Amino acid sequence: MAERGENGRKNDPQQTKEDILLVATEEFSTHGLAGARVDSIAEKTRTSKRMIYYYFGNKEGLYLAVLEQSYRKIRSLESDLHLSNLEPEEALRTLISTTFDHDEANPDFVRLVSIENIHHAAHMLRSEAIRDLNVSVIETIAGILERGFDQGIFRRKADPIDIHMMISAFCFFRVSNRYTFGTIFRRNLSDGDTIERHRGMIADAVVSYLKS
Amino acid sequence: MAERGENGRKNDPQQTKEDILLVATEEFSTHGLAGARVDSIAEKTRTSKRMIYYYFGNKEGLYLAVLEQSYRKIRSLESDLHLSNLEPEEALRTLISTTFDHDEANPDFVRLVSIENIHHAAHMLRSEAIRDLNVSVIETIAGILERGFDQGIFRRKADPIDIHMMISAFCFFRVSNRYTFGTIFRRNLSDGDTIERHRGMIADAVVSYLKS
DNA sequence: CAAAATGTACTAACTAGTTCGTATGTCAAG
DNA sequence: CTTGACATACGAACTAGTTAGTACATTTTG
């Protein structure tokens, strides 16, 4: 058993790495790459700064690891939705709700993506893991659009990447721009009623667009 | 005339301030608040670091000034659109195109807003100038929606702020997430054809939503 | 001249990354 | 099964370089 005595040290590399990543995710997502402090991360960890450099090389390496881990999480989520046995409209609405709920539930991820965009996606480009992200959503959407069109439910032949962008834009923006938008229009986007209304709204908008 | 001789100095406070702001906008928008370097700004300016502190107090003061100036610019743009004499649908499409083109033409502004959101809009909150932004767009949209509903063109009674958010989300996301989205889906969102298609797409989506 | 505007050169504090030394796990040989 | 040698895992304290901010002197302008 790898238990921790009074002051006796037990090696647990896996746990140590995970611990660092968890703390780092929070730090990077709230302060950005340049604003994040390695010392601050080290303090909040149950290990030391030495370990950060031991496992991740340098600050950028740690940032990249955080980014990769975040993307890995969504990839796994995306895949286990079984939409092919649903009616096209129903399938689309389910997919949209899932995206919506994911962004709403993962502000850290949203913030990290925003930060990465400020850096022109420079780190993402260097990471094969992220670049080669199996973008299965697109195939899923393509399938739904095709079925819907063939069945005469959707009148418009839209590009699946465009549709994905439209959905992402709405879901992402609500979270990424929550603060400035909320400040200017004095509206709390985290409010329960607002969430419900917006979830329905984006679905209705996409569906009506495809039907028009 | 305030001309600049061989090495003779001419005071031109207005020009000095504007020069600093211009350089600072670029620096903050590409590196973020923490990532921006005061020394770097000073170098690119035709004046010195001393002047930055003389006029703006400190780094945050400069950042705030940059932010305020950026918002002041859109406010002026928004106001001189004369939409009330257009058909509701036409008016809405014009407004959407304008928002779309503004974001497309001002990536610096988009990036600054993203950055400000990472900081939970903390600086914006402290700035009365920005907080009290006359949100005339909302009134404009409200008017269009009402006319459209009364004329039976729009079947749906939507909240103007929600509609504004839907438009903003799409237009903003295209610019703010250009890099990560482009990397993952190998698509260049700055491409001329794509711009055209997207401009029409958001307008069609909003209109069909309101008509449904 | 007085006040505003500007330049030069500096400093105090911070911060990423390192050095050096120690503890722990493991596996082969006895 | 135990010993010891080697690799991996870890911690405390340090350093070199950076960076926001300033003291002081000087020039321009009304």
Image: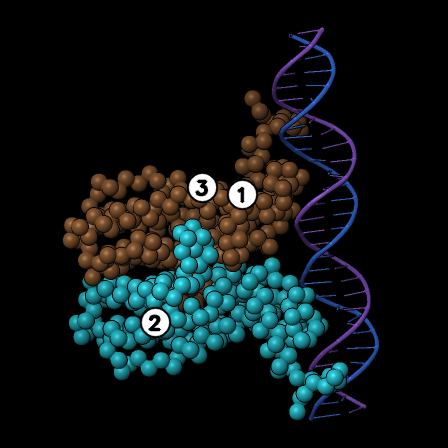
Chain colours: A brown, B cyan, C purple, D blue
Report in which chain the residue with disc 3 lies. A
Kind of residue sitting beneath label 1: Ala
Around disc 3, counting alpha carbons within 10 Å, would you say few (fewer than 14), some (14 to 19), or many (20 or more)? some
Report in which chain the residue with disc 1 lies. A
Residues beneath discs 3 and 2 located on the same chain? no
Secondary-structure class at tag 2 = helix
Q: Is residue B143 left or right of residue C8?
A: left
Q: Position of residue C12 (x, y in %)?
A: 77, 59
Q: Quadrant of residue A42?
A: top right
Kind of residue sitting beneath label 3: Arg
> Which residue occupies 25% across, 48% down?
A144
Secondary-structure class at tag 3 = helix
> Which residue occupies 27% across, 55% down?
A203
Query: Of label 3 and label 1, which has the lower sequence position?
Result: 1
Give the residue number, with chain letter if any, for mark 2. Answer: B97
**Between residues B192 and B153, which one lies in front from this camera angle?**
B192
Q: Position of residue A186 (x, y in %)?
A: 41, 65
> Which residue occupies 42% across, 68% down?
B104
Kind of residue sitting beneath label 2: Ser
- Give the spatial CA distance, label 3 vs label 2: 36 Å
Give the residue number, with chain letter if any, for mark 3. Answer: A72
